[in-house]
Image (spheres, helix red, strand yellow):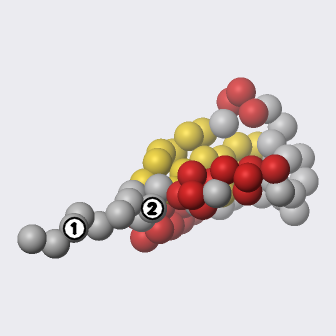
C-alpha cells in the first residue's frame, strides 16, 4: 500500500487594485475568494478562469498563493 499524496494547498483570490502593477488591494474586505485547492494544477486552472472572466477590467487582479510554503515554513510570512 502506498502513502497518500501530500496535498500542497494553494489559495486563489482577487479583487480591485488601484495599480495593476501591484497586489495592493483597494478593499481587502471585498476580496473574491475563489477557493483553496489541493495542487498547483487545479489552482492554476481556477486562477485562469477567474482572470479570464475579468479580462476587460484592468484593475481586477487575481493571485495564486502557495499556502503549503507558509505552512511548511511559518517564518516565511514575515518576508
Query: Disc 1 on helix, strand or loop?
Result: loop
Q: At x 70% / y 43%, what residue is drawn? A: 15
Q: Is 7 positioned to the left or the right of 13 in the image?
A: left
Q: Nearer the viewer, mark 1 or mark 2?
A: 1
Residue 55: % across, % down: 65, 61
Q: At x 57% / y 58%, what residue is drawn? A: 72
- Rendering quarter of residue 70: bottom right
Please tell me the numbered disc located at residue 3: 1
Residue 67: % across, % down: 57, 54
Query: Disc 2 on helix, strand or loop?
Result: loop
Residue 22 visible? The answer is yes
Q: At x 47% / y 68%, what residue is drawn? A: 40
Q: Is residue 42 above or below residue 37?
A: below
Q: Which residue is mark 2?
A: 8
Residue 41: % across, % down: 43, 70
Quick one: which residue is furthest to the left in this view?
1
Front position in the image: 8 or 32: 8
Q: Is 22 positioned to the left or the right of 76 in the image?
A: right
Q: Which quadrant would the C terminus be assigned to in this image?
A: bottom right
- Rendering quarter of residue 58: bottom right
Q: CA distance from mark 1 to mark 2?
A: 15 Å
Q: Mark 1 or mark 2: name the one nearer the start of the chain.
A: 1
Residue 62: % across, % down: 65, 54
Q: At x 71% / y 27%, what residue is drawn? A: 29
Front position in the image: 72 or 44: 72
Amino acid at each position: 500500500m502506498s502513502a497518500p499524496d501530500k496535498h500542497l494547498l494553494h489559495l486563489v483570490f482577487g479583487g480591485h487594485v488601484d495599480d495593476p502593477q501591484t497586489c495592493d488591494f483597494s478593499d481587502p474586505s471585498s476580496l473574491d475568494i475563489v477557493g483553496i485547492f489541493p495542487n498547483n494544477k487545479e489552482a492554476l486552472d481556477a486562477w485562469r478562469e477567474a482572470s479570464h472572466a475579468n479580462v476587460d477590467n484592468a484593475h481586477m487582479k487575481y493571485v495564486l498563493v502557495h499556502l503549503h510554503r507558509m505552512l511548511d515554513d511559518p517564518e516565511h510570512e514575515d518576508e
